[in-house]
Image (cartoon, rainbow, N blue to C red):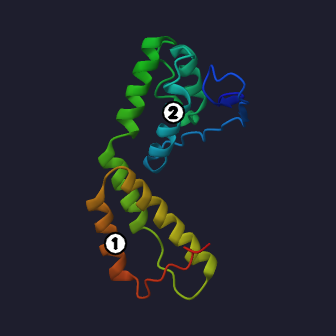
Amino acid sequence: MRGKQTCGKEGDAGKAKAKLPKLVITRFQGTHLDWQSFWAQFEVEIDKLSDIGQVAKFSYLKELLVPRVRTTIDRLPFTSEGYVRAKNILKTNNGRLSEVANAHIQSNMGLPVITGTNQARICEFYEKLVTNIQTLKSMGKEKEIRLCYTYFRQIIRHPSRPCETR
């Protein structure tokens, strides 16, 4: 959501700075599956910036929420305190690690059984599986990952990974 960005330390005299493209943060849809990636990017790209005031950050946050989610914070005062409260509400409603992990586990468990050799369906299955596993791993949920592997070992007869070499 930021404009033109530069790469390089301030005060590096004589060194060219690269102009990076504008970053786009995907709007938060209000699902536990989307939370980890949305919040991590929001924190890095907006929340942790010291050159933007909290009220401006609050504006960005509101714009990055779908209307259904935004209604949970719309009536908060448009102040620094309102911004802090909004972040706490969103984290409480969407960021509980146990609920986020459970959503990724349930997503894996709900993946359809693939029969036959339809490469596109196998790749789609594999990519969804890996995305969920990577999120669980980034959350430190090794036990839950083992649960997923145990589950899939039971239902998969041919454990090859056809999309890994793409």
Secondary structure at badge 2 equals helix
78, 144: nearer the viewer: 144
Please rate how many residues cluster around mark 1, counting C-alpha atoms within 10 Å: few if below 14, some from 14 to 19, many from 20: few
Q: Position of residue 45 (x, y in %)?
A: 56, 31
Quadrant in which residue 93 is drawn: top left
Residue found at x 47% / y 39%: 40
Q: Position of residue 41 (x, y in %)?
A: 52, 38
Q: Is residue 61 left or right of residue 94?
A: right
112, 68: nearer the viewer: 112
Quadrant in which residue 159 is drawn: bottom left
Residue found at x 56% / y 34%: 65
The label nearer to you, 2 versus 1, is 2
Q: Position of residue 86 (x, y in %)?
A: 44, 24
**160 in relation to 63, above or below:** below
Please rate how many residues cluster around mark 2, counting C-alpha atoms within 10 Å: few if below 14, some from 14 to 19, many from 20: few
**124 in relation to 70, above or below:** below
Sequence-wise first label, 2 or 1: 2
Residue 149: image tag: 1
Residue 70: image tag: none
Q: Position of residue 4 (x, y in %)?
A: 72, 28
**94 in relation to 101, above or below:** above
Quadrant where the C terminus lies?
Answer: bottom right
153, 137: nearer the viewer: 137
Write down the residue under mark 2: 44
Secondary structure at badge 1 equals helix
